[in-house]
Amino acid sequence: MNAEAGISEARQNQKGGFMGTCVITGASGHLGANLARLLLEQGRRVRALVREDVRALEGLDIECKKGDVMDRGSLEACFGRGDTVFNCAGRISLTGQPDPFFMSTNMEGVRNVVDVCLAKGVSRLVHVSSIHAFAEIPGNGTLDETMPLVTKNGAVGYDVSKAEGQRIVQDGAAKGLDAVIVNPAAIIGPFDYKPSSMGELFIDLCNNRMPILIDAGFNWVDARDAASGLIAAESRGRTGECYLLAGEWKKLRDLASAISDVTGRQTARSTVPVPLALMASRVNWFFCRLTGTPTKFTPFSIETIQMHRYVSHRKAAEELGYKPRPFAQTVKDTIAWFEQAGRLKLS
């Protein structure tokens, strides 16, 4: 299919440009904060749907509307005809359990966004899913957009929620919604105000709070590159299609080493095999559930760092012009931002 197929007549008449406001759900999150800044740099009008925490948006020339994707009325007040909606809202779970809170946000929240987009006549919806919406590839297979989404049979709750949200958007496209989907890998980078789970991991490595690392890793993508991918998907993505926004796969040890190269600080070097870490996480998860103690060291978090080692972003490169920056540059810029934000003290 031609890369321009599926682009609506209204968008073609604008010669690839967009006249409406850019609405961002989840604008105060890591990806949303980077997206808002990039859109403003391009001279776009930005409206943000926010809940309580607006630190990531302070000082920016944007319109903020209080609301939530679970509140359909707030979406109706925020979306307008001709707007582009970037749905960055979502919940991440480190337990893998089907918690009603994040399941509802990642599924029913998406349904609300799709329904209101259809009702309000938005120009385009760009929905943020995840590479974890796709089923794990056995062996050393490469993940691309042709692979099937996970199903409820045997998959963990978070992965199911992201896959179901993606299916909801695809159903909306079948009903006439001009929608496109992006699937980022593990996001790190500047403007991580809360910080995110990956940001916390990054800070812990910088401060040498992890003396032993698991012998596994993630496919890492810079938040700025992911944001650029969203904007490219808005103007060039094909309706109903999805695009993997990946970067480089690096072990946790590689990340720690890259951090040490920038900071000059000693970071963890010792690693433990995944099977041993998985057994330990099961014991830890059992006792934490008994005592009600929160933990990030869970079987799901261990299994996650083994998944999707080989991820192809060829489709995004060819159709969207997507080109992620070098991993070392992301690490350097992330350290500089955390230090500027007062999250790291390196001297």
Image (cartoon, rainbow, N blue to C red):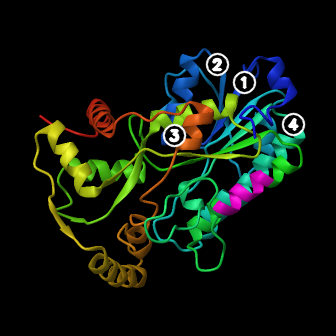
Cα separation, mark 1 vs mark 3, equals 18 Å
**Three-letter code for the amino acid on which mark 1 is drawn:** Thr
* Secondary structure character of the magenta stretch overall: helix
Give how far across and how far down residue 339 sits, in percent: 26, 34
Q: Secondary structure at mark 2?
A: loop
User: Of callouts 3 and 2, which one flags the residue occurring earlier in the amino acid sequence?
Assistant: 3
Above-or-below relation of 283 to 50: below
The answer to whether the residues at label 3 and label 2 have Cβ atoms under 8 Å apart is no
The answer to whether the residues at label 2 and label 1 have Cβ atoms under 8 Å apart is yes
Q: Is residue 55 visible to the viewer in this orientation of the structure? A: no
**Three-letter code for the amino acid on which mark 2 is drawn:** Arg
Q: Secondary structure at mark 4?
A: helix
Residue 73: quarter of image: top right
Give the residue pinned by disc 1.
21
Cα separation, mark 3 vs mark 2, equals 17 Å
Q: Which residues are magenta?
A: 163-170
Give the residue pinned by disc 4.
120
**Side of 341 where 116 appears, left or right:** right
Number of on-image labels: 4
Cα separation, mark 4 vs mark 1, equals 13 Å
Above-or-below relation of 199 to 55: below
User: Of callouts 4 and 1, which one flags the residue occurring earlier in the amino acid sequence?
Assistant: 1
**Three-letter code for the amino acid on which mark 4 is drawn:** Lys
Give how far across and how far down residue 123 sits, in percent: 80, 31
Say which of 63 and 249 sits in front.
249
Cα separation, mark 4 vs mark 3, equals 25 Å
Is 345 magenta? The answer is: no
Cα separation, mark 4 vs mark 2, equals 20 Å
Above-or-below relation of 178 to 231: below
The quadrant of the rendering that contains the C terminus is: top left
**Crowding near the residue tagged with mark 3, few <14, some 14–19, many ≥20 C-alpha atoms within 10 Å:** many
**Three-letter code for the amino acid on which mark 3 is drawn:** Leu
